[in-house]
Amino acid sequence: MLRFLKKRTNIISVFMKKINHFFLLLACSIHLLFWVSLGIGFLDGLFNDSSHRIGKGGDFFQFYQAGHNLLKGKSIYSAQGELVIPYGALNKYPPLLSYTVGLSAQVVSPFTAYKVWVIAIGIFFMCFVLVIRALVPNRQIFLQVVSMSLVFTPYYLDMYMGQTNTLMAFLISLLMLCSVRGNKKPVTALALSLNIKMNTFLCIPVYIANRWWKALFMTAALSAVVFFPYFLIHPKDLSYFLKYVCGAPLDYFYQAGNIGIYPLLADIVSMVSDNKRIIPVAHTLWVVSVLCIAGYVHVRTRTTDPIDCIVLWMSTFFISFKFVWEHHLVMFLPLLAMEFSRNDRRSIGIIWILLALPTPFCLLNMDLGSGYTEVQEYWTHAESMVYHAGKILPMGAFFILVLMRLMSKKVVFKKVLTGIVVAWSAVCLLAFATPSLAGDYIAKARVALYEKNLLKAEQMFQKAIRINPSSCDAWVEYGRFLYNTGLPEKANEALLKARVLNPNHPIFQDKQTK
């Protein structure tokens, strides 16, 4: 009997190895398609950032322009001076990338530099895999982790935009490895990550929990040495940098590119009130709640394991920060990998699949032409809610599973699966069972305008006003419509009503409107 059981176990083990190797080969084939699509573009229509942003390499070009400005002795955050890139946004990152990537890229053209950077992203990904191998000793689990990482679609966006998230994923995994191996505490990895994307600031509780005071001081000192010299030369840029990081316009966060909690909260708030000032208040309460829950669990469980601390605190960023772009999810890979090896693998696997798949963007997309366009304003609140819940729900489920494991609660796969289905059902019910809002008809009017159906557009604007006569947005949009269709007197009447409802509306701050 024992021989039979041992033989059966060996057969199952061999079978699982073959299955893992098959899926690894399949994942490599799909990963290869990501690289092919960078040249052909057949995957671009699946994502907002590759459909409605300024163009391929748009985020990388800000580093290139910043490097050029450094050579000319100008601000790396200013649009003044010679523009040497085909397109791109203003630099929004700490100076380190301008010193390094931006300056070194000046020896070649912008597009050549972008191609080199994409190759570097591929190298960072391989480095991430090597570090994960050191962190996950079980070879079969490691193969499963690699397979799921290879088909992670946000990685395609990271390459398309020329972003730094794969580099950050490598640094976060390296931070984990340095924390659990050897006598050297993680200093350089954290200091570098803080000067690329500042969200690893959330890893500081790891140092506090383990009383790595010397390492914390050295990290702060090294970060300051890298960060502050530029701002000592250009002190005015520090205010711009802090203003962007801490105080970007609220409407900037409500867009299709943001898959974080903020736009979903905005959709929920809009169901009960037109007062947009409630949205940042609701978001602040959400952030405080998430951080308090994480802090309570950390203190209650007295967790000192560095990897557990990093997974716990870094996951709070993804479910609470005001803007989380789809390509940011690449930084989620180290968290998924570690939790997959420590928690219920089926539950984490389901969450991983949901995060790896594209959003339902392609079902809601519209051809708005080339260049920077925003499709969010053409969606009803129901469409927007379903879209924005697509990633935040799995990330929220991940956070809950981490809390349960740290509190020694048993994770049951069936309950996790049921919970995800119930959460999705609740969002869909809330979205589609709610009566149409004024904003829904405004969105429909915009679609009608795009289709050049003026009669339908006017009908939709009027319906929006009938549903909610106190909607300032409805009167503003109707006023714009009337003005553009050659009815300035009626347009002024509509805008005057809007001004009475909300004199602080952005349109009334515009000098031309006044």
Image (tube, helix red, strand yellow):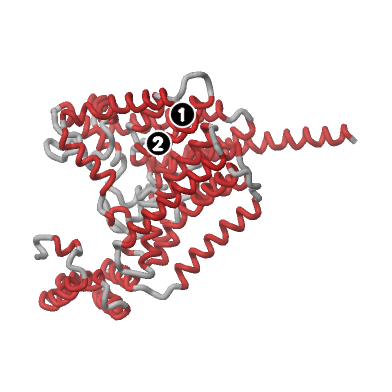
The quadrant holding residue 89 is: top left
Q: Position of residue 366 (x, y in %)?
A: 34, 60
- Disc assigned to residue 185: none
Whether residues under marks 1 and 2 lie with C-beta atoms below 8 angstroms apart, the answer is yes
Q: Position of residue 473 (x, y in %)?
A: 25, 69
Compared to residue 487, the image places residue 175 above or below, namely above
- Disc assigned to residue 175: 1
Q: In screen coordinates, is 433 left or right of 159?
A: right
Q: Position of residue 390 (x, y in %)?
A: 47, 55
Q: The N terminus appears in which quarter of the rendering?
A: top right
| Residue at the spot 40% in from the left edge and 51% down from the top edge | 287
Compared to residue 396, the image places residue 110 above or below, namely above
Q: Which residue is mark 2?
A: 200
Specify the amino acid type for callout 2: Thr
Q: Nearer the viewer, residue 359 or 250?
A: 250
Q: Count numbered badges in the picture.
A: 2
Specify the amino acid type for callout 1: Leu
**What separation in Å lies between label 1 and label 2 (alpha carbons)?**
10 Å
Query: Quick one: label 2, few (<14), some, or many (20+) residues within 10 Å?
Result: many
Q: Nearer the viewer, residue 175 or 149?
A: 175
Q: The C terminus appears in which quarter of the rendering?
A: bottom left
